[in-house]
Image (tube, rainbow, N blue to C red):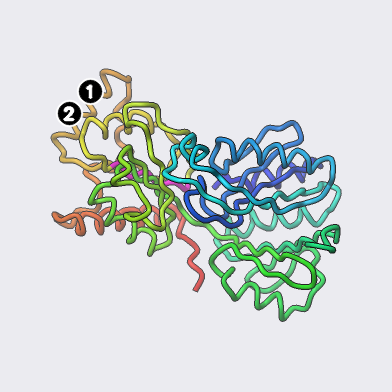
């Protein structure tokens, strides 16, 4: 899977320094989940996203300053209600961004990020640990290392191994996490493959799909144009994207071959609108709810209107889900997630759920 890590490693291997912005902590409706990353080059171009809008623009501006100072910083953010509205979010959010300057002059950096690619390719586990000075120690030299699952360490980190073991076996075992010690803020990020499911439609089926999908290692993004349905009360652990209308162009989500799309909107016309925009996205799975007869009519219409070919329709899983004679929303949800698991396993993308 291509990721921000690929471009970081490529830049360092080419002797080019970069800045990396990571959503480190958040509360409320921040645009992306903790761990979302964006790489910023010295010319201002980026790879990845932390959600767009004002937050991303300010983050890019801050990241470019790192090329002048050569320092890494932790920056708080606070999105007002107006900021959130501009980003199609329900309410404001706050949190912290880690703006990390990664110098090509330090040979450990290329080694660390090349090792991250190797870990992800092998579906192994590792933890990226970074120490940043705080308070009177804010100018203390940044430390960074990668600890692999066999406990080998790449990079430098001046502390006792017992403390490092505590870090990777604590909350950071499965989430991004931080601790304070010796005048430092120590940031711990688990390196693991986790697929993302983009679910178009926030109705009853989606509400049943989401918790099952999350329980088996998927991240979930729920997209709808109804705030009564797409909200934190119904989807407490999902990223929520509230559209103005399904009839307008969809946001440019960071799709890749570790992403899954599930189309379960409230009507076939909306299913058609979404499908027309995501048909050629480079995702691992594309599924749409509906009977065979309605599916065939929709395909015929899209072929006439958009020029889609038979081989493009062939990649769509529709009717969605494994054929288990599901009828209720709960049963349909089980069949959908079962199909997601099957496709993920067949493509060698099993989520790395840390025991």
Task: Tell me the chief SS of the magenta region.
Answer: strand
Single out the residue that lies furthest toward the bottom: 162
**Left or right: 285 as drawn, with respect to 33:** left
Indicate the position of residue 225 as horizontal and vertical percent values.
32, 37
Q: Quadrant of residue 55?
A: top right
Q: Quadrant of residue 66?
A: top right
- Image point 65% across, 38% down: which residue? 58
**Boundaries of the magenta span:** 258-263
The residue that appears at 63% across and 35% down in the rendered structure is 57
For the residue pair 2 and 146, the one nearer the viewer reads as 146
The residue nearer to you, when weighing 226 against 35, is: 226
Q: How many marks?
A: 2
Q: Which mark is residue 235?
A: none
Evaluate whether residue 248 shows in this view: yes
Q: Secondary structure at mark 1?
A: helix
Say above or below: 247 vs 144.
above
| Cα distance between the residues tagged 2 and 1 | 6 Å
- Kindly check if marks 2 and 1 are in contact, taking CB atoms under 8 A apart as contact: yes
Name the residue located 68 percent from the left edge and 74 percent from the top edge: 151
Which residue in the structure is indicated by mark 1? 301
Q: Percent x, y for residue 162?
A: 72, 81
In the rendered image, residue 207, in percent from the top left (x then y), is placed at 28, 54
* Local SS, label 2: helix
Against 105, residue 279 (above or below) is: above
Left or right: residue 329 compared with residue 21: left
Residue tagged 2? 297
As for residue 132 lying within the magenta part, the answer is no
Residue furthest front in the image: 81
Alpha-carbon neighbours of circle 1 within 10 Å: few (<14), some, or many (≥20)? Answer: some
């Amino acid at each position: 899977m291509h990721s921000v890590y690929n471009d970081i490693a490529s830049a360092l291997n080419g002797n080019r320094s970069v800045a990396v912005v990571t959503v480190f902590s958040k509360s409320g409706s921040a645009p992306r989940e903790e761990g979302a990353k964006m790489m910023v080059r010295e010319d201002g171009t980026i790879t990845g996203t932390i959600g767009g809008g004002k937050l991303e623009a300010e983050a890019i501006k801050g990241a470019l300053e790192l090329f002048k100072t050569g320092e890494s910083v932790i920056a708080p953010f606070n999105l007002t209600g107006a900021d959130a509205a501009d980003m199609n979010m329900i309410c404001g959010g706050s949190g912290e961004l880690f703006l990390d300057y990664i110098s090509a002059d330090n040979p450990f950096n290329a080694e660390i990020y090349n090792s991250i690619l190797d870990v992800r390719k092998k579906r192994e586990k590792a933890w990226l640990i970074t120490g940043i000075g705080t308070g009177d120690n804010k100018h203390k030299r940044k430390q960074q290392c990668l600890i692999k699952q066999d406990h080998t360490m790449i990079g430098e980190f001046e502390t006792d191994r017992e403390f490092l073991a505590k870090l990777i076996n604590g909350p950071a075992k499965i989430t991004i996490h931080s601790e304070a010690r010796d005048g430092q803020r120590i940031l711990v990020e688990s390196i693991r493959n986790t697929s993302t499911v983009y679910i178009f439609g926030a109705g009853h089926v989606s509400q049943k799909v989401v918790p099952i999908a999350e329980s088996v290692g998927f991240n979930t993004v729920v997209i709808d144009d109804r705030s009564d349905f797409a909200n934190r009360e119904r989807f407490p652990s999902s990223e929520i994207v509230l559209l103005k209308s399904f009839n307008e162009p969809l946001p440019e989500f960071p799709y890749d071959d570790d992403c899954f799309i599930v189309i379960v909107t409230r009507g076939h016309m909306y299913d058609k609108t979404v499908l027309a925009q995501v048909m050629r996205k480079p995702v691992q799975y594309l599924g749409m709810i509906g009977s065979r007869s309605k599916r065939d009519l929709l395909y015929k219409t899209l072929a006439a209107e958009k020029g889609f070919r038979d081989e493009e329709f062939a990649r769509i899983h529709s009717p969605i889900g494994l054929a288990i004679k599901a009828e209720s929303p709960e049963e349909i949800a089980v069949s959908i997630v079962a199909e997601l698991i099957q496709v993920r396993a067949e493509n060698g993308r099993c989520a790395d759920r840390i025991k």
